[in-house]
Image: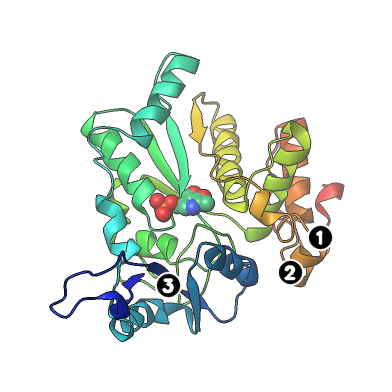
Amino acid sequence: MHHRDRGHRGQRGGLRRPLRHHAGAALRRRTAGQDVAREAARIERYGGRCHPFDPPLAIYDEARRLAGEFGGYYLDHFQSAAHAEDWRAGGLAGALVAQVVQASGGPPDWVVVGAGTGATSATLGRYLRYHNHPTRLVVIDPENSAYLPGWATGYHGYSTGMPSRIEGIGRPRTEPAFLPNVVDLMLPVPDGASVAVMRHLATTTGWRAGPSTGTNLWGALRMAARLRQRGERGTLAALVCDGADAYAGSYYDDAWVRERKLDPEPYRMVLERFLTRGVWVEPWVGGPGESLAAR
Ligand SMILES: Cc1ncc(COP(=O)(O)O)c(C=O)c1O
């Protein structure tokens, strides 16, 4: 949300002095898993002000109300994100396909992405279809998100009302920028799995990424396991979404992760087994009390 300081306006609405701009943001009061205090501090560093609210689905009305109260303009990122990029021209989608063509000689068979506003997946899906690429689009979805149930049921008004614990992806309602018809497959990813893969990536490659990168890579590995199980071959592309700088005190912190019951351990074992033996066994397969390590 963006508002202009009315005290700086001339009598006929003309401008007397340069405007000071304040970015305002509505931030959830409580959080299921994300680090709201850090996010608020980051917004305030840029001169923004934060307005706590609850529950998660109140964000849209609250932002509109604040804009009215301060004489501002409600940017509504969730409505406008779908139109921010010309998907026919390529942008992110074109760059991704070109990179894979250069590396492997052809477009990817599968692309794996997440959905926050849903605009990235919509851009990719439309671009791939418009240019007749054979590539299929997989969207991974964290716990509590409305996208997967909305896609699976065909009810685009689906909402869970629950906040996502993975920063950047998963929404309490199906956002208008998300286009379910250009998505070939959706995969649910447990939040503990996102943390396990994010950490695995950091220790094995030195690439310290954010939690949604973990979600993406879990989805890509799950797809690789599926191809392998069917005796198929294929190229998979996934996005590395953001760096780890913002997450040292959260997803990379054991106490923070424990407090939010985001246990990565069972998923670390799935990953280890897959990467060493090529076998994918979900932690919940098998009877109660049966440890994955013993299987
Ligand atoms: C950090 C981050 N922000 C945002 C998004 C989602 O992008 P969009 O809002 O275009 O759906 C992702 C997707 O993976 C992400 O990882």
From the viewer's perspective, is 241 left or right of 156? right
* Residue designated by label 2: 261
Q: Amino acid at mark 2?
A: Lys
- Residue 110 image offset from top left, x and y in percent: 44, 34
The answer to which quarter of the image holds residue 138 is top left
Which numbered disc flags the more N-terminal residue, 3 or 1? 3
Tell me if mark 1 has few (under 14), some (14-19) or many (20+) residues whose alpha carbon lies within 10 angstroms of its own.
few
Tell me if mark 3 has few (under 14), some (14-19) or many (20+) residues whose alpha carbon lies within 10 angstroms of its own.
many
- In-front residue for pair 100/29: 29
Query: Real-space Cα distance between discs 3 and 2?
Result: 31 Å
**Residue 254, numbered circle:** 1
Which numbered disc flags the more N-terminal residue, 2 or 1? 1
* Residue designated by label 3: 24
Q: Are discs 3 and 2 less than 8 Å apart at CB?
A: no
Q: Are discs 3 and 1 less than 8 Å apart at CB?
A: no
Q: Mark 3 or mark 1: which is in front?
A: 3
Query: Real-space Cα distance between discs 3 and 1?
Result: 32 Å
The answer to which quarter of the image holds residue 41 is bottom right
The answer to which quarter of the image holds residue 279 is top right
Q: Amino acid at mark 1?
A: Asp
> Vertical placement of 204 versus 69: above or below?
above
**Residue 286, numbered circle:** none
Say which residue appears at 71% left-offset and 57% top-offset: 251
Q: For disc 2, does the CB lie below 8 Å from ligand 1?
A: no
> Vertical placement of 192 versus 185: above or below?
below
Q: Secondary structure at mark 3?
A: strand
Q: Mark 3 or mark 2: which is in front?
A: 3
Query: Real-space Cα distance between discs 2 and 1?
Result: 10 Å
- In-front residue for pair 97/139: 97
